[in-house]
Image (tube, rainbow, N blue to C red):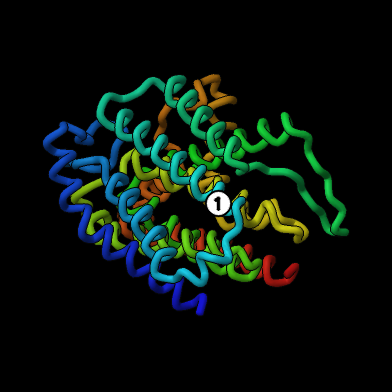
């Protein structure tokens, strides 16, 4: 039955994004949310942004419609699940508005960071917190309230920016998010986190639908609107799912599933720190830039990164199965 629920959520997300994206493209063009080429960027023609707005609307609709279509499954959700869902929906709305403003008016990095911290704080308020970590011997280390808030905000802001910084080639973030959400969905099913499974299936469908317009040559970009949205959802739902389970090695599983953006961002921070440049300063030394520098086409580089991401994702899935 849960496979049916996931398939419905996936289909609704995919169809919703396929239908919404052309409208969003017209809205972005009318509003002037256009990504124009420059020396650092790979694309050659002005391209509409705000693609993440269509993903957001489709994601929310897919999750809520799936819960409405399967009342028996929805009735199994406890008060804390509804609180988590409310927190994630509010957080997603806040980060989408932040991304839309940034895509249109190029928000200063410090202001964007403050918006992300505020968003993460709202999510914490609704119970989305890292409460403990566990190890090999099933020993647990529980955090007190202020530690929960600090660690959770750090995790949410870090993962959100990791996905955001990965966005540099046509279809890269959407494809990586598609693979990661499928793996997260399977991990959530193994652990019995059915709400997380439904959300991950919806995200996978939305990303597949968006790739119809975003794979090279792209006719619309997700922009920060979409990359921040996806990063926030992976960060938040991994806390609700993988990081709130009683299994061992819970921190390792989400890190493996999101290995490509996490390690790419970590190397970028180290690289910029050694060069004494601001952490958020852009450069052309990310993994995808290096692959292009080796002579790969955009499509070849993107597909290779898809493969690397799925390799680590499947390793995370195998680990989840072993410790289950």
- Residue at (51% x, 75% y) in the render: 2
Task: Compare residues 163 and 38 and report the one nearer the observer.
Answer: 163
- Would you call the spot at circle 1 few (<14 residues within 10 Å), some (14-19), or many (20 or more)? many
Q: Quadrant of the C terminus?
A: bottom right
Q: SS for tag 1?
A: helix
Question: How far from the left and from the top, in percent, is residue 47?
Answer: 19, 42
Task: Compare residues 245 and 175 and report the one nearer the observer.
Answer: 245
Query: Relative to residue 136, is residue 158 depicted above or below?
Result: above
- Residue at (18% x, 39% y) in the render: 28
Q: Quadrant of residue 174?
A: bottom left
Task: Compare residues 50 and 268 and report the one nearer the observer.
Answer: 50
- Residue at (17% x, 46% y) in the render: 25
Query: Relative to residue 124, is residue 175 depicted above or below?
Result: below
Q: Is residue 235 left or right of residue 144?
A: left
Question: How far from the left and from the top, in percent, is residue 290?
Answer: 43, 45
Most distant residue in the bottom direction: 1
Q: Is residue 311 visible?
A: no
- Residue at (54% x, 23% y) in the render: 275
Report the number of discs.
1
Q: Is residue 194 left or right of residue 97?
A: right
Residue marked by disc 1: 237
Question: How far from the left and from the top, in percent, is residue 65?
Answer: 36, 62
């Amino acid at each position: 039955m849960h496979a049916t629920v996931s398939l419905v959520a996936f289909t609704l997300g995919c169809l919703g994004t396929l239908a919404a994206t052309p409208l969003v493209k017209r809205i972005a063009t009318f509003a002037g949310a256009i990504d124009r080429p420059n020396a650092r960027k790979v694309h050659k023609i002005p391209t509409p942004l705000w693609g993440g707005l269509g993903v957001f609307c489709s994601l929310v609709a897919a999750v809520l419609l799936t819960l409405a279509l399967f009342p028996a499954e929805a009735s199994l959700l406890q008060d804390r699940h509804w609180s988590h869902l409310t927190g994630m929906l509010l957080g997603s709305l806040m980060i989408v508005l932040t991304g839309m403003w940034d895509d249109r008016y190029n928000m200063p990095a410090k202001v964007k960071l403050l918006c992300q911290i505020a968003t993460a704080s709202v999510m914490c308020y609704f119970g989305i917190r890292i409460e403990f970590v566990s190890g090999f011997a099933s020993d647990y280390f529980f955090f007190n309230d202020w530690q929960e808030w600090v660690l959770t905000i750090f995790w949410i802001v870090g993962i959100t920016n990791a996905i955001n910084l990965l966005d540099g080639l046509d279809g890269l973030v959407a494809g990586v998010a598609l693979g990661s959400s499928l793996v997260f969905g399977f991990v959530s099913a193994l652990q019995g986190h059915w709400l997380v499974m439904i959300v991950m299936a919806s995200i996978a469908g939305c990303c597949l639908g968006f790739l119809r317009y975003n794979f090279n040559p792209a006719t619309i970009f997700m922009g920060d609107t979409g990359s921040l949205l996806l990063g926030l959802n992976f960060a938040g739902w991994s806390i609700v799912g993988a990081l709130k389970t009683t299994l061992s090695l819970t921190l390792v599983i989400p890190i493996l599933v999101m290995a490509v953006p996490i390690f790419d961002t970590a190397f970028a921070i180290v690289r910029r720190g050694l060069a004494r440049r601001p952490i958020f300063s852009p450069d052309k030394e990310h993994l995808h830039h290096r692959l292009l520098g080796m002579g790969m086409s955009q499509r070849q580089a993107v597909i290779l990164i898809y493969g690397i991401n799925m390799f680590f994702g499947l390793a995370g899935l195998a680990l989840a199965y072993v410790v289950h």
